[in-house]
Image: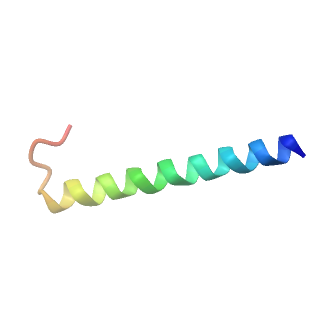
Amino acid sequence: RMKVLSDLLISVAKAERQESRMKIRQDSLRLGNVGVI
């Protein structure tokens, strides 16, 4: 049961990371890529 829980947490963390990465990309596009590394 613990393994299922940890797998779930990992998948959630991955999804959040992917989501934040997309959000950062959208923000950078909105800023016109000015000062974005």
Q: Nearer the viewer, residue 27 or 2?
A: 2
Q: Residue furthest top?
A: 37
2 displayed left or right of 34: right
Percent x, y for residue 9?
A: 68, 47
The residue that appears at 75% across and 42% down in the rendered structure is 6
Judge by depth and name the residue closer to the eye, 8 or 33. Answer: 8
State which quarter of the image contains the C terminus.
top left
Q: Along the line of sight, which residue is nearer the eye, 34 or 4? A: 4
Specify the color scheme. rainbow
Q: Is residue 32 left or right of residue 26?
A: left
Is 2 on the left-hand or right-hand side of 36? right
x, y (%) of residue 26? 28, 60
Where does residue 30 sit, x and y in percent of width and height?
17, 62
Image vertical order of residue 32 relative to residue 35, above or below:
below
User: Total number of numbered labels?
Assistant: 0
Residue 17 in percent (x, y) is at 48, 48
Residue 15 falls left or right of residue 5: left
Residue, x 38% and y 56% (percent of image)?
22
Residue located farthest toward the right when viewing the structure as drawn? 1
At 21% from the left and 53% from the top, the residue drawn is 28
